[in-house]
């Protein structure tokens, strides 16, 4: 239904974590807007308000569609900001672990365990779990980049791939 580009951009804009819930979220928002528009139209007809016209019903429906999206978008922005705040500490611990002779997996595990509980720690632990479960490192890092939405994680993923290819 949606092109590949929009399937990957839309979840980030809407604040949706999983790809499969895009259609559920859009469908639920559309049904919610239609129900609100019908309720406003019915209440206007029930109370004999002749001043409520189609534009007012459409405006209320638009607000019913936009306001939940705006709340999700703001929550997503708060989570991205929290991830960016924890990222420098994560990089410092990762660099110290690698500098002390740990491999990539052990360094990632040590760095993720040193973080306070939050989205970045959860995403890193999920990536480590995927790698331990048999998913390739590249696929796991790609999912990590996609789930986090941070450019910094994408750069880290590319650098870790290069480091592993060079023998770290």
Image (cartoon, rainbow, N blue to C red):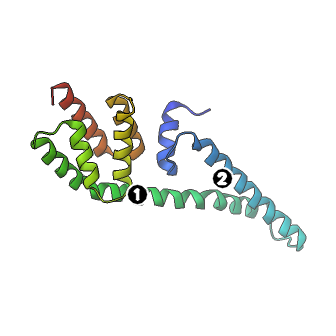
Q: Position of residue 8 (x, y in %)?
A: 48, 38
Q: How would you rate the neighbour count of disc 2 (Cα within 10 Å): few for under 14, some for 14-19, many for 20 or more?
A: some
Point out the image quarter for the C terminus. Answer: top left
Q: Is residue 18 left or right of residue 147?
A: right
Numbered label attached to residue 92: none
N-term mark: 1 or 2:
2
Q: Position of residue 132 (x, y in %)?
A: 35, 34
Report if residue 145 is visible in the image.
Answer: no
Q: Position of residue 159 (x, y in %)?
A: 22, 35
Q: Is residue 155 left or right of residue 99?
A: right
Examine the rendered structure and indicate whether residue 93 appears above or below residue 4: below
Residue 158 falls in image quadrant: top left
81 vs 124, nearest the viewer:
124
Numbered label attached to residue 29: 2
Q: Is residue 106 left or right of residue 21?
A: left
Q: Is residue 149 left or right of residue 116?
A: right
Residue 156 falls in image quadrant: top left
Q: How would you rate the neighbour count of disc 1 (Cα within 10 Å): few for under 14, some for 14-19, many for 20 or more?
A: some
Examine the rendered structure and indicate whether residue 163 appears above or below residue 49: above
Q: Callout 1: helix, strand or loop? A: helix
Mark 1 or 2: in front is 1
25 vs 117, nearest the viewer:
117
14 vs 125, nearest the viewer:
125
Give the residue at x 51% y 37%.
6
Q: Position of residue 30 (x, y in %)?
A: 69, 50
**Mark 1 touching mark 2, by CB under 8 A?**
no
Examine the rendered structure and indicate whether residue 145 appears above or below residue 41: above
Residue 108 falls in image quadrant: top left
Point out the image quarter for the N terminus. Answer: top right
Numbered label attached to residue 79: 1
Give the residue at x 27% y 45%.
109
**Residue farthest toward the left in the current orientation of the protein:** 100
């Amino acid at each position: 239904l949606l092109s590949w580009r929009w399937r990957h951009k839309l979840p980030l804009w809407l604040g949706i974590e999983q790809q499969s819930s895009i259609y559920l979220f859009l469908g639920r928002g559309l049904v919610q807007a239609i129900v609100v528009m019908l309720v406003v139209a019915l209440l206007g007809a029930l109370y004999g308000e002749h001043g409520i016209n189609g534009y007012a019903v459409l405006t209320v429906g638009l607000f019913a569609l936009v306001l939940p999206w705006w709340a999700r978008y703001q929550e997503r922005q708060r989570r991205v900001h929290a991830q960016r705040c924890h990222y420098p500490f994560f990089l410092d611990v990762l660099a110290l672990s690698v500098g002390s002779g740990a491999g990539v997996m052990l360094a990632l595990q040590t760095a993720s365990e040193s973080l306070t509980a939050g989205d970045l720690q959860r995403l890193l632990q999920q990536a480590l779990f995927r790698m331990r479960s048999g998913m390739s490192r590249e696929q796991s890092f790609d999912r990590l980049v996609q789930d986090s939405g941070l450019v910094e994680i994408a750069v880290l993923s590319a650098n870790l791939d290069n480091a592993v290819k060079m023998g770290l």
